[in-house]
Amino acid sequence: MLDTLTQPVEGGRILSTSLVSVFFADDGRVLVGAVTPERLIDAAASGR
């Protein structure tokens, strides 16, 4: 089901709505925020 709700991106998968973005990293981390998907991916890459 996760595969149908998310889009593959470098380093994991992303779910984006008008309110929130969720990044499911390949290493098991999950980042959530009221930000753009790109911000979550950048945060995951930098370790923040």
Image (cartoon, grey):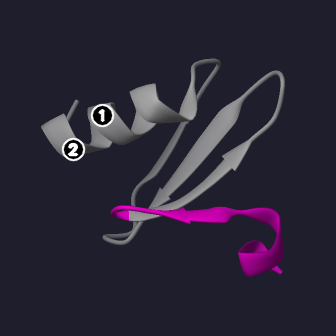
Q: Position of residue 10 (x, y in %)?
A: 36, 61
Disc 1 on helix, strand or loop?
Answer: helix
Looking at the picture, how far across and down is residue 9, in whole percent?
47, 61
Q: What quarter of the picture does the N terminus occupy?
A: bottom right
Q: Which dot marks residue 42?
A: 1
Image coords of residue 33 (percent x, y): 58, 25
In the rendering, at what x and y percent does residue 14 appear? 59, 53
Name above or below for residue 15 compared with residue 20. below
Quarter of the image where the C terminus is located: top left
Q: How far apart are marks 2 and 1 (CA)?
A: 5 Å
Residue in the picture at 57% in, 24% down: 36
Q: Please state which amino acid type lies under the numbered disc 1.
A: Asp
Picture disc at residue 9:
none
Mark 2 secondary-structure assignment: helix
Between 47 and 3, the residue placed more toward the observer is 3
Mark 2, residues whose alpha carbon is within 10 Å: few (<14), some, or many (≥20)?
Answer: few
Graded by Cα atoms within 10 Å as few (under 14), some (14 to 19) or many (20 or more), the crowding at tag 1 reads few
Q: Quadrant of residue 27?
A: bottom left
Residue shown at the point (65%, 63%) measured from the top left:
7
Q: In the image as oriented, which residue stretches furthest toward the left?
A: 46
**In the depicted structure, whether residue 44 falls above or below residue 10:** above
Say which residue label 2 marks: 45
Q: In front: 8, or 40? A: 8
Magenta residue span = 1-11
Taking 8 as reference, is 14 above or below it? above
Q: Of 28 and 23, which appears nearest the observer?
A: 23
Is 44 part of what is drawn in magenta? no
Please indicate whether residue 4 sits to the left or right of residue 6 in the image.
right
Locate residue 47 relative to residue 39 in the image: left or right.
left
Horizontal side of residue 4 vs 48, given as left or right: right
Q: Please state the total of marks drawn on the protein image.
A: 2
Q: Do the residues labelled 2 and 1 touch (CB within 8 Å)?
A: yes
